[in-house]
Structures are given as C-alpha cells and as structure tokens.
Image: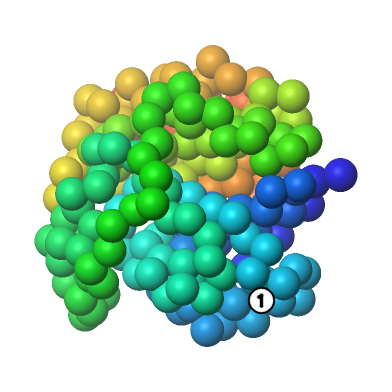
Amino acid sequence: MVEVHKVSGAPYDSNVFLVMDEHPILVDAGMAPEATLRNIAKYIDPKKIERIVLTHCHHDHTGAAVALREATGGKLVIDRHEVGALGDDLATLAHMFGRMSPECSPDDILDEGKVLDLGEWKLEVMETPGHSPGSICLYEKNAKVLFSGDTAFPDGNIGRTDLFGGNSEELIQSVERLTKLDVKIMYPGHMEVTDRDVNRQIQLSLRFAKSVL
C-alpha cells in the first residue's frame, strides 16, 4: 500500500510530499533541507529516495533541491520548460524570500504524458502552465490521486499569475484540464491535503479563475 507523508521543514515552505512506494520519491523540495530530512527519516531512510520531482521552479518549492539531492542521492527532475529557470533569482522568485537561487542542473527532464513508475502507482505528468511556464501536476488514475502543485488548491483556490512567467489564460486552461479528471485526494503545493468532494473543489477553482483572471 502506498503511503504519502507531508515532510515540509519550514512554515513558508511549499508542501513537500514523501511518496512511499516500491520506488520512493519526493514531490517538491521546499527551502529547509535539514528539517525536511529529519521529517523524512521518521518514515524512511532518506537514501532510499530515488527522485525529487519538482512541480515548478519557484524557490519555495526548489530552494532545498540541491541539498536534498546531495543528501539522498535522488535524481532531480523538472519539466523541460523550467530547466533554464533554475538558478535564476528572478525566475525562481528567490529574491522575494531574500535568498539566492542555488545553481543546479536537473538529472532528468519531464514533459507532457511521461509516466513515473513508482511500483503500485504510475504518476502521469500533466503540463499545466499558468502559475509558471513549466508548472506540472501529477495524476494517478487508479488511485485517483492528484499532486496539483500551485495550479489548483483546496476550496476553489488557484495559483497566482501576477508573478514572473505567470499567464492567466494558460492557468484557466490548465485548471479546466484538471476538472476532467476523477480526483479523490488532492495533494496541493500549499494548504492542506483534501479528500472532501475534490472534483467539486476543482470546479470551484475553475469558476474562481474565470471570474478573477
């Protein structure tokens, strides 16, 4: 049985999820590697993590990526549209956190339709731009699980589009794609995990996006 644990290390971090399957991964990295590693170690030897999958380049999701790669040996992966943004203080918004974006190159590149085979779960990569040019979501159709990054959040919320690389029209289109999925559990990039009528929550996100963007 697959287990998912939130292992984020700091209050302003993105959510960092440890997905424990035959091939364990992290979804996003946050900004606090030491605390995140301590949280991971409550469930698994960090050295068993095989991939660190970044939903997009923003610093609150990637600031600890290099340190976590060094500590775990996991391969760092990100969408092809975000590769050039890594290490760029403007594109990653590191300056908004009073930090510098660490230089790094990914070990592998993701694109639309790629499947990450974890064992029981097969996570499909969905390119969902809008919050950033290369934002992705990960969907497991059998478990009806969605890792939504900063594209959609619980209770009808959505990712911002007023930051570097944001695009309102693309975000609306991306959220509309998510409404066509059957989702029982949503693991968002921020806020809490939800399993409460998730399809309706995503429909509310689309309605909200169309009303304000």
Q: Is residue 171 above or below residue 41?
A: above
**How many other residues sit within 10 Å of disc 1, few (<14), some (14-19) or many (≥20)?**
some
Residue occupied by mark 1 = 39
Q: Residue at x 15, y 66 (%)?
A: 89
> 14 or 62: nearer the eye?
62
Q: Residue 63's image quarter?
A: bottom left
Closer to us: 99 or 44: 44
Q: Secondary structure at mark 1?
A: helix
Residue at 40%, 25% in the rendered image:
112
For the residue pair 189 and 46, the one nearer the viewer reads as 46
Check the picture and name the quadrant holding the N terminus: top right
- Report the side of 212 relative to 15 (left or right): left
Q: Quadrant of the C terminus?
A: top left
Residue 155 visible within the image: no
Residue type (three-letter) at the residue carrying disc 1: Asn
Residue drawn at point x = 60 percent, y = 46 percent: 187
In the image: residue 194, left or right of residue 190: right
Residue 37 visible at all: yes
Vertical arrangement, residue 55 with respect to residue 199, above or below: below
Residue 113: % across, % down:
46, 22
Q: Position of residue 163 (x, y in %)?
A: 18, 51
Above or below: residue 63 compared with residue 151: below
Residue 47 lies, in percent from the top left, at 64, 69
